[in-house]
Every structure is written in C-alpha cells, then in structure tokens.
Image (cartoon, rainbow, N blue to C red):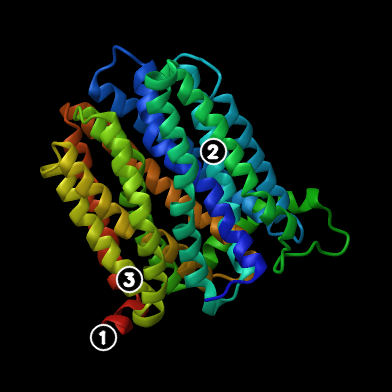
Amino acid sequence: MKFTKLERNWVLYDVGNSALVLFNTSVVPIYFNAINQGASAAELVTAWANAQTVASLVVALLMPILGSLADFAGNKIKFFLGAFLTGFVLCLAQAIPMSALPFLVVYVLCTIGLNSSMTFYDAMLTDVTTDDRMDSVSSSGYAWGYIGSCIPFIVCIGLILGGPAVLGLDMLWCVRVSFIIIALWWLVFTLPLVRTYRQRFGKTLGEGATLGTEIAKTFKGLGTTLKSIAKDRQLFIYMIAFFFYIDGVHTVISMATTYGSSLDIDSTQLILALLVTQFVAFPSAIAYGRLAGKYGTLRMILIAVFAYVCIVLFAAFFLQSAFEFWILAIAVGMFQGGIQALSRSYFGKLVPKERANEYYGFFDIFGRYASVMGTFLVATVTSLTGSASYGVLSIGVLLIIGFVLLLKLPDARHEISK
C-alpha cells in the first residue's frame, strides 16, 4: 500500500521513539544493575518493576484529562510536543553520571514523557488516515519502528561493547554517550510529523467559553465519556479485555531483560537476542496488518494473545539459558508488533473521531494501569517467593482472562465462524 506524506511522517515517529523503547528494555536495565551493585537478583527485579509501575500509573492518571483538553482543535500537536520535549530532555539527562536512585527517578520521568507522547501520537492516527487504511498504517508504524530503531541501537551496542576493548573507554561512559545518540535519533524522526501534522477532528469551544472554563468542564466530561463507553457494549468489553491481555504484553516487554539478567544470562547474549526480536518483528507486524484485512482484526488479536500465553509459560518453566532466551526473543518478535498495532487500530475504528484523544486517554488508562498491575504483580510475587519465575508465571492468568473476554465480542464470534 502506498502511503500519503502525512501517513509516512506519522510512521516515522514510531521509528524515532522505538529506538528509546528498545534501549530502555535492553541496555538500561543492565546499566541500572551495574550502578546498583550489591543488590540481589530479586531486589533488582523488584526495583525495576516498581519503577515501571510508577511511570505507568502517572501516565494512566494524567492521560484522560490531558487527552480531553488535547481534543480541542489545534491542541493535539501542542500536547504532543510538550510530552516529547519532556522525554527528550530527560533522555539527555540520563547521560549525566549519577547513583542508582537518582538515575531511576530521571528514568521514570523520561518514561512518563515518552509514554505520554505516544498516547497523543496514537490519537493522531484518526487524523492522518481513514478507517479502511488504519490497520495497515498502524502495523507499518510498529514494523518500521522495529527495524528503524535497530540502526542507532547497533551503533550504541558497537560503542558499548567495542569502546572498552578497542578504544580503552569505560563501559559506563559508553552507555551514557548512547543516551545522547538515542535522543538525537528520536528528535530527527519527530520533526517531519511536527512540520506536516494537521488536526482534522477536534472539539470546538462553545460561544463565550474559554479554555479555562473548558478545563473546569473536563472532569464532568470524563464522567460522560465513561458512561458512553459503558453503554457501548462492544467497546466496553473490548476495553476490559484489552486491560487484561495487554498486561502480559507490556510486562513481558518491560521485564524480559531484567528477568534474563536475574538468571545470570550474559548481558551480550540478552542484547543481541533482543536485537533479533526487532528484525523478526518487522515483517511480522506488516504481515499482521495484511492478515487482519483478510481474516479479521479480532481474530488476529486472539491468535497473538494465545501466543503470549505460551510465551509466558515457556519463560516460567523452560527459560534457563541464553539459548532459551533467544527462542523467547524470536517468539515475542513474531507477535509483539501485531498485537499492539491491531489493538490500537481496532480501538480507533470504534471511537468518535472528534474525541479521539479523550477516548485514547481512557484506552491508555486501561493499557498503562494493566502495566502497573502486571509489574506490581511480578514484583510482589517475586518478593514473596524469592523466585522471579513465579512472578512471570502469575501474569499468564491475566492473559487468559483477556482471551476469554475477547471471545465474547460480536465481531470475534462472526470472524471465527467464517
């Protein structure tokens, strides 16, 4: 499918932010472990899970309110830029040498900026394309994000692994320089979207109203939106299902490297395996977009959720060595982009376009709070049992609940009966 200029520039932002997402899920946990010497494996997993929990919870609480304000004509790009610049500056700040706790605080604030920008970015999907092209455009965003993020990642890994051996540089210094490289990459691939984006759908201020009065109305409006969601049976069931199944997806993504590190798997093996995940995810995400058009969006989401149940079981019972981690990384790559892209585009088809940001704010509550629940569950179970494997196993139940709820959707029954 040939993209319009605006669709292409929207996809490019995924290329930019995915570099930081990949770096955060692979190198940053290892860096945190390196500057947090003396902590046990269980303590490291718990600390990292709690950091993810705080970041996700803040975004989940803010997004419905900020999303409602962003829905006013011309506001979406302003809120997007505010979130992006917050994440960008704090990404650069992580290059400053600091101890474990201050670093974790800066990391959490950077993650809040990153994830907030991605919520506004998701809501832009309704402005940049049409319903019939949404699955393909959304999937392409994830696909090109995966493959594009590999370029700065490979440069950073070359610096981190080769700097000490070839140039005699300190490895921690190389990681800090990598934060600067990642931040600049993110900036370069954000600019095209900023220059060309125009908000097509949006709310308008009533006669005599000001933005200040509308802010006061926002909280009442959020209650109205919640009632609208509750009355729309298909949308309501889908959001509840999404709440549960995306928990497993986000938790596996955010905790994979920390979990592998706690099993004493070599950090180089962990990083290289996750790099392979990106290359596998590129064609898989594109294929998912095309298969959704042929077999149905919900059917493909169901397949991905079932695959994640199998991935969690494999991680809990069989993951012991670098070889098993490579298998896990490849399996995640096959389904990660597809389930995220189709979840985003399917939701975009169900909501009113002029209130997309507000609805995506609630979508983000369900997605981010699920991440809070997932990482909190992993941290709690790991702390109580002293075993990270039990923590990983616990999220399988949530995936199964999400799968069962998806089966109750009218679209799912129709697609499965074909």
Give the Cα separation between the discs numbered 1 and 2.
41 Å
Q: Secondary structure at mark 2?
A: helix
Callout 1 amino acid:
Ser
- Mark 3 burial class by Cα count in 10 Å: few <14, some 14-19, many 20+: many
Report the residue at 73% width, 60% height from top.
196
Mark toward the start of the polypeptide (1 vs 2): 2
Residue closest to the far bottom: 418
Residue nearest the viewer, comparing 349 with 274: 274
Tell us which disc is closer to us: 1 or 3.
3
Residue closest to the far right: 208
| Residue located beneath label 3 in the image | 300
Mark toward the start of the polypeptide (2 vs 3): 2
Report the residue at 64% width, 71% height from top.
4
Report the residue at 40% width, 21% height from top.
166
Would residue 360 appear left or right of 302 to someone viewing this image?
A: right
Q: Secondary structure at mark 3?
A: helix
Question: Percent position (x, y) of residue 190?
Answer: 64, 49
Residue closest to the far front: 166
Callout 3 amino acid:
Met
Give the Cα separation between the discs numbered 1 and 3.
14 Å
What label sits on residue 112 in the rendered view?
2
| Residue located beneath label 1 in the image | 417
Residues tagged 1 and 3 counted as in contact (Cβ below 8 A): no
Residue nearest the viewer, comparing 48 with 360: 48
Report the residue at 16% width, 29% height from top.
385
Callout 2 amino acid:
Ile
Residue nearest the viewer, comparing 208 with 11: 11
Q: Is residue 48 visible?
A: yes
How many numbered circles are shown?
3
Q: Secondary structure at mark 1?
A: helix
Give the Cα separation between the discs numbered 2 and 3.
30 Å
